[in-house]
Image: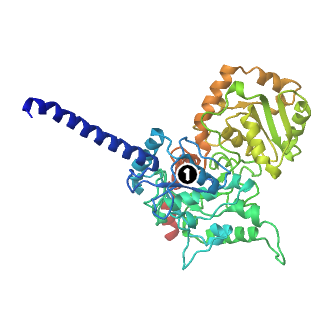
Amino acid sequence: MSEKNMKPSRIYLCLITISMFLLIFSSVFLFQSCNTSFISGSVFKQIIVNNSSVYFRPDSNRNRVKPPSHTYVASLVDSRTLKSKSLRDGCRGSSTIKEIRTVAQRRAKICNTNQALLKVYMYDLPSEFHFGLLSWKGRGGQKWPNVTSINHIPIYPGGLNLQHSIEYWLTLDLLSSNSPGIARPCSAVRVDNSSQADVIFVPFFSSLSYNRHSKLHGREKISVNRMLQRKLVEFLMNRDEWKRRGGKDHIIVAHHPNSMLDVRGRLGSAMFVLADFGRYPASVANVEKDIIAPYRHVVMTASGDSSSFNRRPILVYFQGAIYRKDGGYIRQELYNLLRNEKDVHFTFGTVRGGGINTAGEGMASSKFCLNIAGDTPSSNRLFDAIASQCVPVIISDEIELPFEDVLDYSKFCIFVRSSDAVKKGFLLKLLRGVKREKWTKMWERLKVVAWHFEYQYPSQAGDAVEMIWEAVSRKMSSVRFRLHRGSRFRRFELVDKIN
């Protein structure tokens, strides 16, 4: 065969070879994209702890579960259901791959203690104060659960218990801050030496203690809840850390309105993390020193493409307890005004019989969701509305809101004075006057800020856990200011006492 005839054959052969190579390469790439096996071993596998996202190192003995394709995390769904659903979903495309790569990049950055927003010293309290309340028992002197293993993290009780579970998420976050295998923001890092800490964290699950252990059982003369509170006070009063600054640099989570009820006065110098100030005298808790934290919502989180204005047939939604104490009388008045109005859903509701799911579906089908003062100024209903992307209407004159120094609630909530709300026709005229363009603007803003009210483990940038730590950091500036002013002449006073 002549050289002239061989050239086209060689060209064809090269083209065929290249084509086969590209075909094989693309097939392998597509296969690996679906099972994410092309990602390096440092990328974490997503599993679910208490309905929240958790990332761990890949384990050959576990099925791989890929992260969700949207920002928000589902709540109050059985973890096994979520896990199997993720497996069934299979490959979701390039957006998921991009998110996995982002996680890998974050994983590569180990938190430097000196670069953390807050250095936190956490007391090694006995487990009876924290995870022991969840029936966890350490082995061989183990003080804390192994937070790098899904099998060793105790599950927090579901239902309405979850709404006050803030101490659980903060404690897990601090424990994970010393684990190089967990990706999280460098907002708060646990330190071993209290003298190096900005704040001292008290890991007492006070809300769970009240919810589960405030009643007497059998021959008990004092409830477990009251006994733990007394033991905690005794512990703190004997600590050098408390004596050093009178407890002003201590953080105590007491989110349930009745938690720490017996001893809150004795510990009032500390920084409380609360739901509101409804049952506290101003001398014990106030906006100057304490943190208002969001409830953990109990309805499902709406996806990023939730129903818009025209696809929400209900104008106003409220479902819950109507006859309440204290400032909650207004619920009954509004019920009498609104119950027979068209496009208004205002009914009694409980958590029983699928009440939470029903409420979530109703909120997701409504333009406005009422958040009315109850026994205290706040309620979980506000955060359920935010999770449902239903524009909240806040009727609670004494309410304090989480992170209000950095969030402008007027851009995604409507505030109505109680005295105006009970005027016949006032509320419906106001809400019916909100046109589609204005409502959509608030709804779009609501979708952006909703992330700040999500609790999850491990914490992620901008979520509720990090927002709380940032709020603590802002409060600590004023705490340090007061402490420094108070110690201006202290050195000379000490010298005089010695002489």
**Tag count:** 1
Please say if 194 is above or below 312: below
> Can you tell which quarter of the image residue 249 is in?
bottom right
Residue in the picture at 61% in, 46% down: 454
Residue in the picture at 67% in, 51% down: 77
Kindly identify the amino acid type of the residue bearing the numbered disc 1. Answer: Leu
Rendered-image quadrant of the N terminus? top left
Please say if 426 is above or below 489: above
Where residue 324 appears, as percent x and y from the top left, is 87, 46
SS category of the residue bearing label 1: helix
Counting other residues with Cα less than 10 Å from the Cα at mark 1, is it few (<14), some (14-19), or many (20 or more)?
A: some
Could you tell me if residue 284 is visible in this image? no
Where residue 404 appears, as percent x and y from the top left, is 62, 38
Please say if 337 is above or below 250: above
Location of mark 1 (residue): 87
The residue lying toward the viewer, choosing from 271 and 386, is 386
